[in-house]
Image: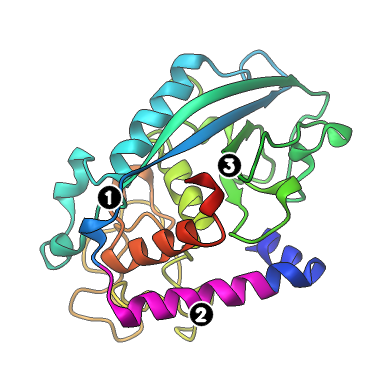
Amino acid sequence: MAAHMMLLERFPAFRAAQMRLENATLRRRETGFDAAKVKLVTIKTVVNVVYKTTEQNISDAQIKSQFKAMNKDFRATNPDRNQTPTPWKGLVSDVRLQFKLVKVTRTKTTKSGFGVDDAVKKASTGGIAPFSPKTHLNLWVCPLTGGLLGYAQFPGGPEATDGVVINYRAFGTLGTAEVPFDKGRTATHEIGHYFNLRHIWGDTPDCSGSDMVADTPNCAGPNFGTPSWPVVTCNNGPNGDMFVNYMDYTDDKAMFMFTAQQVIRMRTALDTLRGGLI
């Protein structure tokens, strides 16, 4: 969200595009939308590995493991979805998006780590520019500082920085992927942002925020680790926070689902500002 707010301040056109997208999403909700009937879309995806050490230059097998995981998550075929608490099982939704790896770039850098300032996306600052970001999802995999797992650019921002950045220790399900972030869910979460999903707590600590999704209960803040259900905040009992949602901060093994209303947000982004991906 720090990167998002910085872009909103620096690029008035980004702020305007986000407002148009919210209006389009609202119209889509009001006119009705059957997520089960939307077309299956394959997103051409590029992985940009930026590394300083041999360990950080992750293997092709590790990259493939990430695609296997996130394709299950976005199609709601992940086996652990069955662990969703009973009140929400009917909300588990297929986004009808799948991701195809079409290109891997490998860039050796002298930088020990990157932050949220998009330096990894520019050759002049130790990284590499995105490949055809209008038509391809770009994923950068690199060492991130400060315990950061990843960050993403919301739809409508500058092409030169468009895509998702993920820590090499939280990418895929093998190799350098470390417990508790070793099931590929960091990419699932960040790609959710890339398609205009917000954190389920609305990024405020006092119940006043909103993720603009009707079927995710309002909650006070992020959940961490592997909570026991229910966790009740913001008068959202008896079921409490939907901490099993991919857009919370729980461990990979504790998140299993997107909801139907989240699918509406993602598919509206795909049909509008991210239409070049189709």
- Three-letter code, disc 2: Asn
Q: Nearer the viewer, residue 31 or 160?
A: 31
Q: Is residue 8 visible?
A: no
**For the point 40% across and 43% down, which residue is it?**
185
**Marks 3 and 1, the one that precedes in the sequence:** 3
Classify mark 2: helix, strand or loop: helix
Q: CA distance from mark 3 to mark 1?
A: 28 Å
Residue designated by label 2: 23
**Marks 2 and 3, the one that precedes in the sequence:** 2
Residue 162 picture location, percent across and down: 66, 48
- Three-letter code, disc 1: Phe
Classify mark 1: helix, strand or loop: loop
> From which residue to which does the magenta span run?
16-33
- Three-letter code, disc 3: Thr
Q: Is residue 242 left or right of residue 18?
A: left
Labels 3, 1: front one: 3
82 in relation to 3, above or below: above
**For the point 20% across and 43% down, which residue is it?**
80
Q: Nearer the viewer, residue 136 or 185?
A: 136
Residue 110 picture location, percent across and down: 83, 24
Residue designated by label 1: 256
**For the point 52% across and 45% down, which residue is it?**
277
Q: Nearer the viewer, residue 94 or 116?
A: 94
276 in relation to 208, above or below: above
Which of the labelled discs sits on residue 205, or is there none?
Answer: none
Q: CA distance from mark 2 to mark 1?
A: 29 Å
Q: Residue 259's image quarter?
A: bottom left
Q: Are marks 2 and 3 in contact (CB under 8 Å)?
A: no
Few, some or many C-alpha atoms within 10 Å of disc 3 (few <14, some 14-19, many ≥20)? some
Few, some or many C-alpha atoms within 10 Å of disc 2 (few <14, some 14-19, many ≥20)? few
Name the chief secondary structure element in magenta: helix
Residue designated by label 3: 135
